[in-house]
Image (cartoon, rainbow, N blue to C red):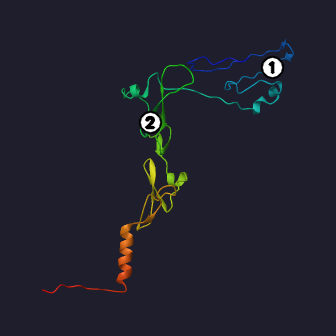
Amino acid sequence: MQIPIPYLAQEFRIEAQRATRKVGNWSFNNCTYGFLAYKDQYIFQETDLDNMKNRSFLVALEWSVGNTSCKEAKKNKTSYICKENSVCVDFNSDFDRDPGYNCRCAQGFKGNPYLTDGCQDINECEEIQTFCIHGCVNTIGGFTCQCPIGMSGDGSLYGSGCYRSEAAKSLRNFLYIGQYTLIFQKTLP
């Protein structure tokens, strides 16, 4: 038997009773199975009963906090539950239902946005491919790429990269010329 989960259900419980009678071509014994599966992702087959303990089923859980938008929820500091380093996201559903919201850790953070100190800074330099050419510096919620001394740019493989700055070029040229010729100029009265 397949049944939909009622709208706004807060609990799902399967209670199975022993069935030993014969129905059509099926005979039932004291092995009873019940499971929750995503709509249209499972079609019952008799062979499933032989190996049901080793099966897994896709389930999509849609839920939200309250029945108000982020904008409204933020007005009530005592009931608003998104914690520091998190963002509020208005709930979008495939179903026509009341609004609500979810919390997500802000970009550059991971963890549980509903707990105090639940969203922790990600060290992007260690955890993700940053595409920094010469060096990476972790910052709160992000990172920056570095260029070597005497070079400018964003230090990123996909940005401006690193290039010699005009000041560094001038200094290099001055030092290069200066090692061969040292000229003092003094104006006489």
Q: Position of residue 102 (x, y in %)?
A: 49, 30
Foreground mark, 2 or 1? Answer: 2
Q: Residue furthest toward the left?
A: 189
State how far apart marks 2 and 1 are (Cα).
Answer: 50 Å
Q: Position of residue 71 (x, y in %)?
A: 40, 28
Q: What element does badge 2 sit on?
A: strand
Residue sitting at x 65%, y 29%: 59
Per the image, the residue denoted by label 2 is: 87
Q: Position of residue 81 (x, y in %)?
A: 43, 30
Q: What element does badge 1 sit on?
A: loop
Q: Earlier in the sequence, mark 2 or mark 1?
A: 1
Q: Is residue 167 above or below residue 107?
A: below
Residue toward you, 87 or 117: 87
The amino acid beneath tag 1 is Asn
The amino acid beneath tag 2 is Val
Q: Residue furthest toward the right?
A: 25
Q: Are marks 2 and 1 in contact (CB under 8 Å)?
A: no
Residue sitting at x 44%, y 38%: 86
Answer yes or no: is residue 20 visible: yes
Per the image, the residue denoted by label 1 is: 30
Classify residue 118 as left or right of residue 185: right
